[in-house]
Structure formats: structure tokens, C-alpha cells
Image (cartoon, grey):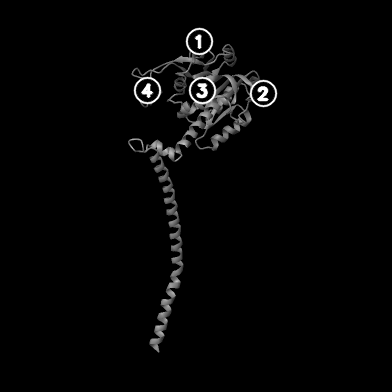
């Protein structure tokens, strides 16, 4: 009896094992089916590509040597058509931009339909609020006087980028100040930093020429006092002059020693004499509308150097720009009739 009972228990144990193992087996079987379907799909896709390439090879069977170039393979797989479409779209975008169809719709103040004599951008930084207030109390109009100046055809804005930590207290302080004064041009895509000044020139001219229809675009540093009425008269006498690149023209030695002031990391590009080409000094640079448009259209491919005035000068090389050297724009000079001076 005992043997019979033991045999019965053993039979039950063996019969219960397949039931316990059935669920994992079903899961494994399901995963096996999914893996098989994935591999089969990939093999089917690869087979289609092989058929395309084989057909292409038969089409070129009369040519020697019988090889497929990379261009042939890309064309067969449709990549060349996609590449061609991308190039066409880029060309259409550049053409539209050059014809003025891509106007910046940011609400930066001013009227895009009005024609202006000049847009004056005063470079500023996050720590320069006291200096801005000093300018507002001296040569730069504010409030209603700023609006009346715009009615005369002249726009003045403090030009600043954004903080590296977007939305921090630096950005918020500038936004709060601008809500009160409404005299900022904020370059949303530019990071405000000393080493980024050459790029700031690209962003300023590009943004300003998209927003305002003006004859001239003027960049000045925030360490200058400006004789505003004299500058307006100066620009009025240049009315209708295209391709004008105006400033205090200079050249100068390229600094090759790292650590010295005005060091140029790419000094080797300026030849054996290590001298800069002729360019307008960075304190005050004036460009006519078509030159500012050139910067806007080609901004993605324009090279910047260590200094903003050198960078702008390099963009003018190769263009039919008219270089206008005027001593009155040499703000550090001693002439009595100069249009600017150190603040």
C-alpha cells in the first residue's frame, strides 16, 4: 500500500510540471515569432534594395568596368532626389530673403512700412544700465521725444543679446527696463558676451534691416557721446548713396602674441606683413541698406574674426562697396567738428 501511495504521488508530480512550465514556453514562443517577423521584414527590405541595384547593374552591363558608383547607388535609392530638393529649397529661400519676402514679424517696436533715414544701434551690455540712463539724459531722446525722432526718420535703439542662461535675472531686468523705456533692440538669437561681439554685428545688421526700411544702418559703441543732429545732417547729405561703407578708416598691425590686447587667433591669414586690410574702426560704422542686406542674406556663411570691425571689413571685401573715410567719425581724434567723442 505504501508503495502504491508513493507511486501515485510521483505520477502527480510529473504530471503537474508541464502545466507549470507552459506559460513561460508560450511567452518564449511569442517572442520567437516576433523576432522571426522582424528578421523577415528586414530581409524583404534588403531584398528590394538588392533588386533595385541588380536592375541598375543590368542597365549598365554594356559599360566597362561593371561597377556601381556611389552616385548610382544614391540615385537608385532615391537619396539624390532628396538632396536635389534640399538644394532647390535653399536656393528659393535665399532668393525670397534677398527680395524682402521674409520680414521679421517680431514686435520690436517701430513700423516696418515707414521709410527711415537711419537706424542707429547703440551697443550695450547687462551691466550698463547707469550708462544707458546717462545717454538718455544727454544726447539720446527718450519717451515722446524718441517717437518724434522716428517721425523725422531716425530710429535709435540700445542693442543687446540674451543671457547664456536664458530667462534668468539678467534677461528679466532688460525686459523690465524695455517695457518702461521702449528703446531696446533685443537680439533673441544672440548670446551677449564680450567674445561674441563679432557675431553681434551680424545679428544687429541682419535684424535691423529686416525690421526697418532705412537708407543707413549705424553701429556705435556705448563709450561714445554722439552729436546726433550733426550725424543726421551728415547722413542727409549722403541721401540716395548705395553701397556706402562709412567710418574712420584705418589699418594696423595684427597682434600675433596670445595674451596681448587685440590678439587675433587667426593672424596667419593676414599674410607675411601681418597687417589688417582697410576697414572702418569699430567705434562707429555706417552701412547703406544694400550692404546690410548682403550681411542678412549671407549671414550663415560670413566669417567672423576676433574683432567686430575687422569682421565687418572682411565682409565688404569683394563687394562693390564705396569706402568713405571721414575724419569727423574718428571719435578719438582731436578735430573740433567731429560727430562723436568719448563718453
Asked if 253 appears above or below 52 in the picture, the reply is above
Tell which circle, 2 or 4, labels the residue nearer the N-terminal end.
2
Q: What secondary structure is marked by label 3?
A: helix
Disc 3: which residue = 294
Q: CA distance from mark 1 to mark 4?
A: 35 Å
Disc 4: which residue = 269
Residue 335's label in the rendered image is 1
Q: Quadrant of residue 158?
A: top right
Tell which circle, 3 or 1, labels the residue nearer the N-terminal end.
3
Mark 3 vs mark 1, foreground winner is 3
In the image, residue 273 lies at what x, y percent?
A: 34, 17
Q: CA distance from mark 2 to mark 3?
A: 33 Å
Q: CA distance from mark 3 to mark 4?
A: 23 Å
Label 1 with label 2: CB-CB less than 8 Å: no
Tell which circle, 3 or 4, labels the residue nearer the N-terminal end.
4
Disc 2: which residue = 144
In the image, residue 159 lies at what x, y percent?
A: 55, 26
Q: What secondary structure is marked by label 1?
A: loop
Of 158 and 242, nearer the camera is: 242
Asked if 269 appears above or below 11 in the picture, the reply is above
Q: Residues within 10 Å of mark 1 (few under 14, many from 20)?
A: few
| Residue situated furthest front in the rendering | 62
Tell which circle, 2 or 3, labels the residue nearer the N-terminal end.
2
Q: What secondary structure is marked by label 4?
A: helix
Q: CA distance from mark 1 to mark 2?
A: 33 Å
In the image, residue 162 lies at what x, y percent?
A: 53, 33
Of 71 and 191, nearer the camera is: 71
Q: Residues within 10 Å of mark 3 (few under 14, many from 20)?
A: some
Q: Residue at x 62, y 21 (%)?
A: 141
Tell how many labels.
4
Q: CA distance from mark 3 to mark 1?
A: 33 Å
Q: Is residue 248 visible?
A: yes
Amino acid at each position: 500500500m505504501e508503495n502504491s501511495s508513493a507511486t501515485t504521488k510521483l505520477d502527480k508530480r510529473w504530471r503537474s510540471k508541464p502545466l507549470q512550465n507552459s506559460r513561460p514556453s508560450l511567452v518564449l514562443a511569442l517572442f520567437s515569432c516576433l523576432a522571426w517577423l522582424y528578421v523577415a521584414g528586414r530581409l524583404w527590405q534588403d531584398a528590394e534594395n538588392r533588386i533595385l541595384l541588380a536592375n541598375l547593374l543590368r542597365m549598365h552591363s554594356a559599360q566597362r568596368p561593371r561597377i556601381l558608383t556611389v552616385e548610382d547607388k544614391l540615385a537608385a535609392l532615391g537619396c539624390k532626389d532628396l538632396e536635389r530638393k534640399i538644394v532647390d529649397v535653399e536656393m528659393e529661400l535665399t532668393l525670397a530673403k534677398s527680395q524682402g519676402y521674409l520680414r521679421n514679424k517680431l514686435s520690436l517696436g517701430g513700423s516696418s512700412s515707414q521709410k527711415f533715414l537711419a537706424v542707429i544701434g547703440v551697443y550695450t551690455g547687462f551691466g550698463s544700465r547707469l550708462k544707458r540712463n546717462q545717454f538718455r539724459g544727454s544726447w539720446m531722446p527718450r519717451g515722446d521725444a524718441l517717437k518724434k525722432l522716428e517721425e523725422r526718420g531716425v530710429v535709435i535703439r540700445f542693442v543687446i543679446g540674451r543671457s547664456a542662461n536664458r530667462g534668468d535675472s539678467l534677461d528679466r531686468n532688460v525686459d523690465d527696463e524695455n517695457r518702461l523705456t521702449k528703446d531696446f533692440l533685443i537680439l533673441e538669437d544672440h548670446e551677449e558676451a564680450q567674445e561674441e561681439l563679432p557675431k553681434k554685428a551680424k545679428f544687429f545688421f541682419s535684424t535691423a534691416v529686416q525690421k526697418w526700411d532705412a537708407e543707413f544702418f549705424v553701429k556705435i559703441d556705448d563709450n561714445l557721446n554722439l552729436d546726433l543732429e550733426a550725424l543726421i545732417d551728415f547722413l542727409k547729405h549722403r541721401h540716395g548713396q548705395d553701397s556706402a561703407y562709412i567710418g574712420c578708416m584705418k589699418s594696423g598691425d595684427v597682434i600675433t602674441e596670445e595674451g596681448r590686447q587685440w590678439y587675433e587667433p587667426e593672424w596667419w591669414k593676414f599674410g607675411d606683413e601681418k597687417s589688417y586690410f582697410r576697414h572702418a574702426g569699430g567705434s562707429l560704422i555706417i552701412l547703406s541698406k544694400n550692404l546690410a542686406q548682403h550681411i542678412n542674406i549671407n549671414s550663415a556663411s560670413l566669417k567672423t574674426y576676433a574683432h567686430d570691425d575687422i569682421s565687418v571689413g572682411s565682409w565688404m571685401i569683394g563687394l562693390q562697396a564705396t569706402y568713405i573715410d571721414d575724419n569727423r567719425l574718428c571719435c578719438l581724434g582731436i578735430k573740433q567738428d567731429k560727430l562723436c567723442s568719448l563718453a
